Image: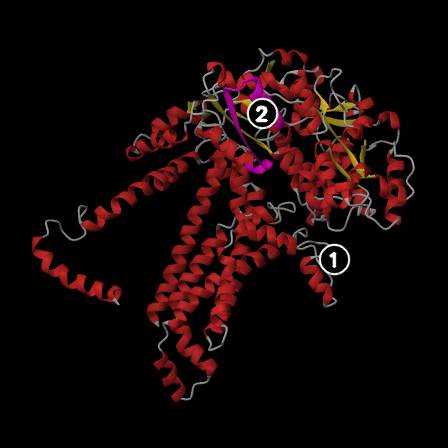
Amino acid sequence: MSRESDWLREARISRAQFFRMMGGLAVAAAAPAALSACSTQQNTGATAGAGGDAATALKFIGVADQKAPMDELVAAYRKVKPGVTITTSFAPTDQVQTSVRTQLGAGNAPDLHVVYPGNGSAMSMTQIAQAGLLADLSAQAWTTTIPSGFKPAFQLDGKTYMFSAGSSVIGAIYNKKVFEEAGVGELPTTWSEFLAACEKIKKSGKPPIALGAQTPWVTQLITYALVPSTVYAKDPAFDDKQLAGQATFAGSGWRQAMEMYLELHKRGYFNDNPNGTTFEQQTSMVATGKAGMAIQVSAVLPDFRKAAAGDAADLSMFPVPGADDAAQVWIPAGVVVGLGASAKSGNLAEATAFIDFLGRQESINAWAKAIAAIPLTQDSGSTIDPAVESFLPFTKDRAVPFMDQRWPNAEVQPTHFAVIQELLAGKSTIDEALKKMDEAYQK
Amino acid sequence: MSVTTRPAAAAEAVPAAGPRRRWRRGGALSPPWLFAAPALFVYAVVVLYPSIAGVLYAFTDWSGIGGEMSFVGLANFRAMLDDEQALGSIANTLLLTVAILVVQNGVGLLLALGVHARIKSKALLRVIFFAPVVVSPVMIAFLWKYIYNPAPDAGLNGLLAVFGLPGRDWLGDPSLALWSIAGMVIWQNAGYSMVIFLAGLEGVPAELHEAAMIDGAGPFQRFRYVTWPLLAPALTINLMLSTIGGLKLFDQVFAATNGGPGYATETLSTVLYKQAFVYGDFGYSTAVALVLALFVAAVSFVQISYLRSREVAQ
């Protein structure tokens, strides 16, 4: 969208000024007052009474992935601070994106809400912090222990605006039984071995890879699994170069990753009609042994285990080898979706105090355990899900954050979803797809 | 019975009260306006004010959050001309609207004629055909996602397999997805069109049919020359409602395909939603919304003027 600047553009105005400029609409003057009177709710929590604490009610809105850890930690917090009640609500990503963004825009956001790490989506830390709507958490002790590689996910201009309990990885969630029945003994560590394993599973009569590409975010995971090896292993500073305008999707290993993605499709390694298949169907296919594996983020392991019911032990994960030299295989390891405190909250002190509680090592451990993540910082009490252990050797110097976390706007990621669906449908070419992504990146 | 007699009594009372009225008929202080005032006030506050305020955002670059914005003149509207996604969505929206308009009203009319006939179970059938209308569109979309499951043995494909027909990837094939959505919408709303046509059919006087029969008209001729012209008002309402519904279509598309695969089922409504809440470009989204609103208003105006003139002519 080209926005030619004219003299008006120079005149930045605040939202308050904007409203004043519409002062002619006098009849409506009562409306905002009446509406905000309905929405403001402060200090109305029940007096839980211990120790004469003034009762405070905090509101949190998060995504469905956060329900298990938040339920556990909110209950734990009630024991630490009985005077504070936290009401939580959860919804799928796109719904939260709509409702919380609208509330942020209207100035009545919940005290605590979901924040996506880094940049690149409408609810990401950078986009909301830039608008001045996230509270600065930099004074909290846990922020000093954020590993340096993860800092861009948590921080903008050196200040921390988001809490997250750790990182998750993208790899293949596979069904051991299906692999055994197809005669795949050793897990693949190179691309050729990966293709060979797929071939064996295909010959055994099952789709090697379940792909639920009708669910938009699922489309990106295979590219994300391959790009660390095809782009970042060769050029770890790719993001910086791309931001500086010295590198493009079309002129990089992204092309190779897309070719590999389509090679899997052409060889018939995906289920039929991936564009008509959803994440839930993909999950069920692998969990019930109807497909070999799904390339997925480790945070959804609990969903797969639930779908597998009694056979959850058959499920595990391995890194997708995106290169033919095992030493050149890199993996995607990104900070998991987190939360922040609204800078406009009427209970800012209590809201940030809860985040400080989440930053304690035992809280980090509990959160990470609930979603099979690798804890942000670790101590003797930390547990790491056995399924992601094979990723640990990579996390030190052969891992890169999820690509969108460094993208400059919220349009690149949905463009990526759409072009993958078009490629799978045979309605586009890799050239066109990468061109569209480059165009979205430059907006 | 008392219900039918009361209006007549009231009508007699009004002229008697006439000389004592201090207001002129239709004046701002007349009782009709006073009674409507509370509703008009609420309407102004929750509908008019936000709509007018929203129009102004179309000329800014507001992100949807944060306090800063600047006026960009007509840049948002110019950008729309180069936006493949927005232009593609206009084509999709029009195709969907035409498909829904024609098929939904065709099916609705056939259903109405069917259940208007003297058949035993017509009351039950009316309820069954109308039932989908009362279900939330999102729920319908989720139900149809099961029906449109691409697996060869599931849903619609399973049914086709019984007859030896090959299955399709109903929502995953870009050349088919739009029509699959149209099918789903028509299935839901045909009952609504049926009810309106049915009301029109009930209003066709039996004497006219009798007269036509005496003159030797067959069933088709009676439909063509008696029923059809008298159904004109019902047709006007139906065509207008389905046009507006088609142009504004959002819920079913969003729940079934989210505009995908690729951009194959993107409508103006899903584009404006994505611009505002996914891409964080509220100003541009409002511009798209404004274009949609003006477009719907223009189409409805033309359509209703034409159809009304047709009613008068007949």
Residue under pointer 2? A74
**Mark 2 vs mark 1: same chain?**
no
Residue B184 appears left or right of B8: right
In terms of secondary structure, where does tag 2 sit?
A: helix
Mark 2 and 1 residues: CB-CB less than 8 Å, in contact? no
The residue under label 1 is which amino acid type? Pro
Q: Residue at x 35, y 72 (%)?
A: B314
Q: Residue at x 13, y 51 (%)?
A: B24
Nearer the viewer's eye, disc 2 or disc 1? 2
Quadrant of the rendered image containing residue B53: top left
Q: Which residues are magenta?
A: A72-95
Residue A183 coordinates in the image, percent (x, y): 92, 42
Front residue (pair A294, A221)? A294
Residue under pointer 1? B152
Q: Chain of mark 1?
A: B
Q: Chain of mark 2?
A: A
**In the drawing, what numbered circle is on residue A177?**
none
